[in-house]
Amino acid sequence: MAARKWDWGLVAKRFRERRRLFGWSIDDVAARAKVSRDTVMRAEKGQPISDKSLHALRGKYAMFSAQLVPHERASDAFSNCPANQVKWMAATHRDHKGDLVKDIDYSFVDDPAERRRRAILGYQRFFTGFIRSELDDGVMTAGLMEIYQLSWTDQHYGEEFVYCLSGSATIVVDDVPCVLEPGDTMVFDALRRHSYAPTEGSDLPAVILFIVATRPNESERMASALPPRETWGV
């Protein structure tokens, strides 16, 4: 994959706001991400850091990589994302036996026919369409999911809202399934173990909209959750 062009000013703002939202000090972040204190400070000043350090920090801040690259905004008053600007990510679990995403490969597949081809061939279980309609210092992350197979089990920060757009999706939270038909919604604590799948016998793919909102006590909740999450997002 080609090297990304990070927006270091945006990185600084997002990392700084997320650290304050989680209630962490610079030393807290450095210890959690296993990077130096100077690296955290450089990132928050908008100075370039290595991709490895940026990935480590981004994982602890629970952010998508797409949230740290340049994008156009129509106004300082709001952020919108036309449908043709949604970036579709494909994540491949390196260890399908594990429950948590400890290490990942990722790419973008924006062509719907190519996404379906890869899914039918068994290369991808699902695709996530990242939506850029969010504030730089906001508390919500939104995206779309095209689900072709059962996902791996996930745990991450926040309160998650799900709306079924098309097909039929089965969301399992703490081993309890919830079947969503078009127009159905659900909400759950995303620190609970959860997975996504197309409902058996339904047309593929199931397409859902998800919104994850951060809460003020998120850092304490994440620290006390078992097992700990190694990383979040892609």
Image: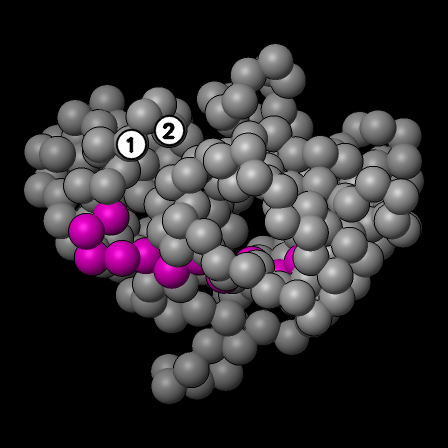
Q: What stretch is highlighted in magenta?
A: 208-218
Q: Which amino acid does label 1 sit on?
A: Ala
Q: Give the percent coordinates (x, y) of residue 122.
A: 84, 28
The answer to whether residue 3 is magenta is no
Magenta stretch: residue 216 in it?
A: yes
Residue 201 bears which disc, if any? none
In this figure, which residue is indicated by the disc labeled 2? 229
The residue depicted at 84 percent of the width and 54 percent of the height is: 112
Q: What residue type is labelled 2?
A: Arg
* The quarter of the displayed image where residue 35 is located: top left
Q: Quadrant of residue 56?
A: top left
Outermost residue to the front: 176
Residue 107 visible here:
no
**For this view, does 75 lie left or right of residue 234?**
left
Which residue is located at x 66 percent, y 34 percent?
151
Left or right: residue 188 versus residue 172 is left
- Which residue is nearer to you in this view: 135 or 155? 155
Which residue is the site of mark 1?
A: 225
Q: Regarding mark 1 in the picture, which secondary structure is present there?
A: loop
Q: Is residue 10 left or right of residue 3?
A: left
Q: In which quarter of the image is the N terminus?
A: top right
Residue 85 rendering spot, x and y as whole percentages: 65, 66
Residue in the foreground of this view, choosing between 162 and 112:
162
- In the image, residue 123 above or below residue 25: above
